C-alpha cells in the first residue's frame, strides 16, 4: 500500500532555496510529499495557501510584506492547514513569535532532507516539531513564572504595528522603515501614531524605553 500524500506549500523569498528544498524532498527515501505551490512574500503566500489548502505550509519567518507571523494571522481561519516554520534564524524572539502566531513547529535550514520530510509528516499528523535547541526557547517562554504569558499592552498592537515599533526602537528613520517594510513613509507615520496612542506614550523616546524594557529590540 502506497504512503499517503501530504500536500505542501513552500513560502520563502529566496527562489534558489525553494528549489533546493524541492530537490531535497525528492531525494529522500520516504515518498509522499507533494509540493503544490510556492510563494515569496506575504500577499502571494496568503493567495496560494487559500487557493490550494495544503496540509502543511513550510514558512520562512522573514518575508517581504509583514513576515511569517502576518501569514499566520491572515490564514488563521483556514481549517486543516498546519504551519511549520523553516528559517535560517534561531533567535528566541522569532521562534516564540511564530509559535504564538499558530505554527506547529520550528526547524532551522540546517535540517537534512530526510529529517525535514519526517517533520512535515509529523506536523501533518498534529505533532509539534522543533529543532532540539529551539524547543528550550518555547518551554522557557511559556513556563516562565516571573512574567505573564500574555502581554496585554503588546497584544493591542497589530503585527505590522509591532514591526514598526521594533524598528523605531532600534533607531531606524521613518524613510528606512518604509523601505524595509515596503510601505510609504505616511503609512509608517500612521502606524507610529497608532502605537503611541494604544500604549499611551508621548514620543519615540518613550516608545524606545518601553520596547527595551520588554526586550523587543
Image (tube, rainbow, N blue to C red):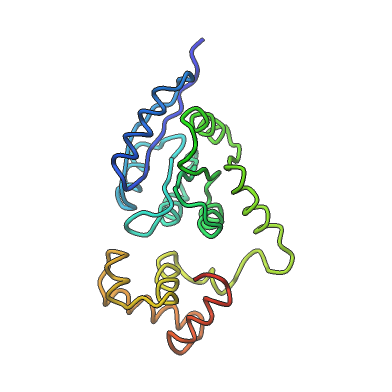
Q: Is residue 27 above or below residue 175?
A: above
Q: Residue furthest right?
A: 145
Residue depicted at 29% across the width and 70% down the height: 178
Q: Which x, y percent locates residue 137?
A: 62, 54
Q: Which x, y percent locates residue 201?
A: 49, 86
Q: Is residue 69 above or below residue 174?
A: above
Q: Which x, y percent locates residue 88?
A: 44, 48
Q: Residue furthest front?
A: 110
Near-viewer residue (16 or 70): 16
Near-viewer residue (168 or 78): 168
Q: Residue furthest bottom?
A: 202
Residue 170 occupies which quadrant of the picture? Answer: bottom left
Residue 86 lies left or right of residue 180; in this view the side is right
Residue depicted at 37% across the width and 59% down the height: 66
Q: Which x, y percent locates residue 122?
A: 57, 32
Number of numbered labels in the structure image: 0
Residue 162 occupies which quadrant of the picture? Answer: bottom left
Q: Is residue 9 above or below residue 138?
A: above
Q: Residue furthest top?
A: 1
Residue depicted at 51% across the width and 53% down the height: 98
Residue depicted at 44% across the width and 64% down the height: 159
Amino acid at each position: 500500500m502506497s504512503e499517503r500524500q501530504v500536500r505542501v506549500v513552500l513560502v520563502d523569498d529566496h527562489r534558489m532555496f525553494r528549489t533546493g528544498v524541492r530537490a531535497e524532498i525528492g531525494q529522500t527515501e520516504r515518498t509522499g510529499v507533494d509540493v503544490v505551490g510556492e510563494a515569496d512574500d506575504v500577499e502571494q503566500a496568503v493567495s496560494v495557501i487559500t487557493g490550494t489548502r495544503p496540509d502543511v505550509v513550510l514558512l520562512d519567518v522573514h518575508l517581504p510584506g509583514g513576515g511569517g507571523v502576518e501569514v499566520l494571522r491572515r490564514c488563521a481561519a483556514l481549517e486543516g492547514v498546519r504551519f511549520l516554520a523553516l528559517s535560517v534564524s534561531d533567535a528566541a524572539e522569532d521562534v516564540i513569535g511564530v509559535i504564538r502566531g499558530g505554527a506547529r513547529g520550528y526547524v532551522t535550514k540546517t535540517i537534512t532532507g530526510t529529517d525535514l520530510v519526517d517533520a512535515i509528516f509529523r506536523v501533518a499528523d498534529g505533532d509539534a516539531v522543533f529543532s532540539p535547541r529551539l524547543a528550550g526557547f518555547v518551554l522557557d517562554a511559556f513556563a516562565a513564572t516571573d512574567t505573564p504569558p500574555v502581554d496585554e499592552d503588546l497584544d493591542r498592537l497589530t503585527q505590522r504595528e509591532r514591526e514598526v515599533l521594533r524598528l523605531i526602537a532600534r533607531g531606524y528613520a521613518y524613510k528606512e522603515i518604509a523601505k524595509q517594510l515596503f510601505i510609504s513613509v505616511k503609512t509608517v507615520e500612521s502606524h507610529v501614531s497608532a502605537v503611541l496612542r494604544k500604549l499611551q506614550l508621548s514620543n519615540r523616546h518613550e516608545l524606545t524605553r518601553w520596547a527595551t524594557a520588554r526586550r523587543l529590540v
